Image (tube, grey):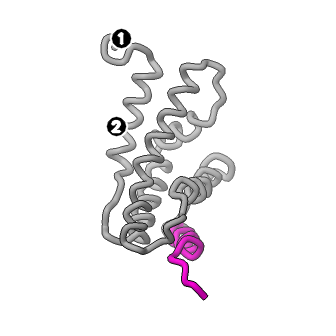
Amino acid sequence: MTRRWKTRPRLLIDALLTHTEKSVPIPDTGSVRQDLIDFFTDLAAFVSTPTGIAFVRGTVVSDRDPEVEAARKEFWVERIGKAAVVLDRAKARGEIADDVDPELVLFALGGLLHIHVTHIGTVLSAETVVRAVDLALTGIGPRTNS
């Protein structure tokens, strides 16, 4: 372990990134709506598993160990960065406004999922995922000059 990862937090980050990339792939359907629905549907399914629940709860537990905190931050920065490509592609296709902040959209939709899992104890239904994506798209769609 120590030659490749050096520390337990490094090992954990590598394992989490590998697992979430397989469980929650970044879709590329050619439609921002479908990409977001697919991504958050897969994410909702993942966090409803025992591994997913432990993962979500584990990422919010405060830890005063600077290495653990740095590893947690690294995981989220990398994962959000990879998911942001969905919205970057949508900008290039003209599906959303050029000034949309991909991280803000992902945090808003992800926050809904997070609140359900960590505070309410439920998982988002497929219907709620679609409604949340449609709500977000209403706010980030292309702007027209009126």
Q: Which mark is residue 65?
A: none
Whole-percent x and y of residue 45? 44, 54
Q: Is residue 69 above or below residue 50?
A: above
Mark with earlier residue (1, 2): 1
Q: Which residue is mark 2?
A: 18
Task: Place residue 22 in its image quadrant.
Answer: top left
Q: Residue furthest right?
A: 119
The residue pinned by badge 1 equals: 2
- Image point 36% across, 54% down: which residue? 26
User: What is the x, y in percent for residue 49?
Assistant: 46, 46
Instruction: Give the image quarter of residue 4.
Output: top left
Figure quadrant of residue 108 = bottom right
Residue drawn 49% across the image and 40% down it: 77
Specify few, some or many for label 2: CA neighbours under 10 Å numbering under 14, 14-19, or 20 or more: few
> Is 40 included in the stretch rendered in magenta?
no
- Rendered view: 35 above or below 121: below
What is the crowding at mark 1: few (fewer than 14 residues within 10 Å), some, or many (at least 20)?
A: few
Secondary structure beneath disc 2? helix
- Residue shown at 50% from the left, 77% from the top: 142
Prevailing SS of the magenta stretch: helix
Magenta stretch?
129-146
Does residue 10 sit above or below 82 in this rendering?
Answer: above
Q: Quadrant of the C terminus?
A: bottom right
**Residue 99, x across and y down, in percent:** 54, 65
Measured Cα–Cα span from mark 1 to mark 2: 18 Å
Q: Amino acid at mark 1?
A: Thr
Residue most extreme to the front: 145
